[in-house]
Amino acid sequence: MHILVTNDDGVMAPGLLALAKAMRELGEVSIVAPEQNWSASGHVKTMHRPLRVKEVLLPDNSRALASDGAPSDCVALALLGLVESQVDLVVSGINPNANIGHDVTYSGTVTAAMEAVITGNIPAIAISLDGPDNHGAPLDFTPASAVAKRIARAVLKRGLPKGVFLNVNVPFLPLDQIKGYRITRQGLRVYRDSLDRRYDPRGRPYYWIGGEAPTAIPEEGTDYGAIASGFVSVTPLQLDLTA
Ligand code: MN
């Protein structure tokens, strides 16, 4: 089995290496990831400039390809031939923060998995850890890596329906305190964005879309409901957004 690993936090992010190590236990791994952080970049297709790719060494001295494109560009590049052998599964992450509710439209982690469905028509998994904001110490990706491995193994064995990919969110708990797995639907994020207008030294305004970190409604059956009660959330998603 050949697994393509990518992320939206950049090729040197610790979550990518943790995920790649877990996937190497299931098969051959190729890594194509953005060279910079593209979190909350949404679904991107770079069409008005060329894409560059360079080989880099990860902290464990393994090889990866880094592109100046978005996460979804990285998946398209790989599946259109940059990676020569057939890819069986695309796994994106491990993002250090949850991707739930409407986040899926902003998330580079999730849109990389979407691109696997569009370009490759192959199974894909986005995996995110519900890590705390402003966490001082490095995050422990061990539990989320174990979850990723278990779900990837199941997907490699059983496949997914055509056009469906999985959005996985893991509670920020030690593995033995995670209560289990829930198949969920998308829940509702509560964004608390506000416009922060500031002025540069020449008196011209500039803007941040700021505000407090988003919360969510912990409704049972939803992605956030699951992680809020200590379960791994597995949300099957598709790209047909028709109401
Ligand atoms: Mn990210």
Image (cartoon, helix red, strand yellow):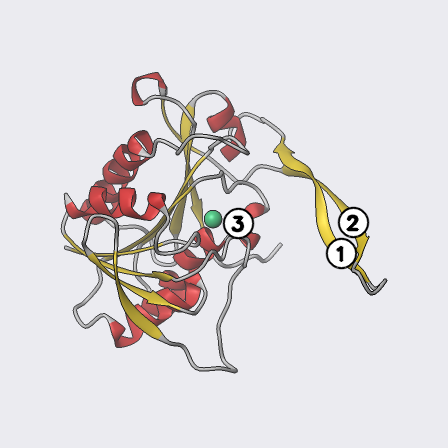
| Amino acid residing under circle 3 | Val
Q: Ligand 1 closer than 8 Å to the CB at disc 1?
A: no
- Identify which residue, 101 or 202, lies in the foreground: 202
Mark linked to residue 195:
2
Spot the residue most to the front: 201
Among the 4 quarters of the image, the one containing residue 169: top left
Q: Secondary structure at mark 3?
A: helix
Mark linked to residue 234:
none
Q: Residues within 10 Å of mark 1 (few under 14, many from 20)?
A: few
Q: Quadrant of the image for the C terminus?
A: bottom right
Does residue 104 appear left or right of residue 188 in this picture?
A: left
Spot the residue most to the top: 177
93 up-or-down from 35: above or below: above
- Asked whether disc 2 touches disc 3, contact meaning CB atoms under 8 Å apart, the reply is no
Spot the residue most to the right: 203
Between label 2 and label 1, give the one nearer the viewer: 1
| Amino acid residing under circle 1 | Tyr
Q: Residue at x 78, y 49 (%)?
A: 195
Please name the residue that numbered disc 3 is placed on. Answer: 104
Q: Is residue 158 visible?
A: no
Q: Residues within 10 Å of mark 3 (few under 14, many from 20)?
A: many
Does residue 124 appear left or right of residue 149 in this picture?
A: right
As measured in the structure, the alpha-carbon distance from the residue carrying label 3 to the one carrying label 1 is 24 Å
Give the image location of residue 189, x and y in percent. Answer: 62, 38
Q: Is residue 168 visible?
A: yes
- Asked whether disc 2 touches disc 1, contact meaning CB atoms under 8 Å apart, the reply is yes
Please name the residue that numbered disc 1 is placed on. Answer: 207
